[in-house]
């Protein structure tokens, strides 16, 4: 993958993450969620990705 495409993809992913967090911060008071619940969202996404990676590697063997 050319570096230009990689840099563009990385910038888009970071921008999308920033917009997602901003929208979640706006929605949290409307839904009366504690801020600790917002911190669990990235952790849950990380766990999902790790589980999928581990399952994918075990299927290949």
Image (cartoon, rainbow, N blue to C red):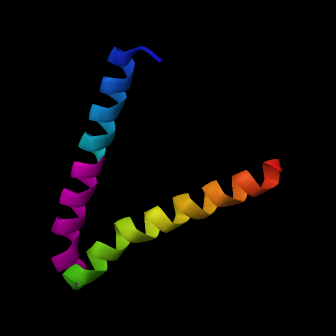
Residue 42 falls in image quadrant:
bottom left
Q: Residue at x 35, y 75 (%)?
A: 40
Residue 15 locus on image (x, y percent): 24, 41
Q: Residue at x 23, y 50 (%)?
A: 19
Residue 31 painted magenta: yes
Residue 21 falls in image quadrant:
bottom left
Residue 55 locus on image (x, y percent): 71, 59
Q: Residue at x 50, y 67 (%)?
A: 47
Depth order, front residue of 27/34: 34
Q: Residue at x 38, y 24 (%)?
A: 6
Residue 26 falls in image quadrant:
bottom left
Q: How many marks?
A: 0
Is 12 on the left-hand or right-hand side of 52?
Answer: left
Is 26 on the left-hand or right-hand side of 14?
Answer: left
Q: Residue furthest front?
A: 61
Residue 60 painted magenta: no
Q: Image height check: is 6 above or below 37?
A: above
Magenta segment: 17-32
Depth order, front residue of 2/19: 2
Is 13 on the left-hand or right-hand side of 1?
Answer: left
Residue 46 locus on image (x, y percent): 45, 63
Q: Main secondary structure of the magenta part?
A: helix
Q: Image height check: is 49 above or below 38?
A: above
Q: Image height check: is 36 above or below 51?
A: below
Residue 31 locus on image (x, y percent): 25, 80
Depth order, front residue of 58/49: 58
């Amino acid at each position: 993958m050319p570096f230009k495409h990689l840099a563009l993809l990385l910038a888009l992913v970071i921008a999308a993450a920033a917009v997602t967090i901003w929208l979640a911060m706006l929605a949290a008071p409307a839904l009366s969620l504690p801020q600790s619940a917002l911190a669990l969202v990235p952790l849950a996404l990380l766990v999902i990705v790790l589980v999928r990676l581990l399952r994918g590697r075990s299927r290949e063997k």
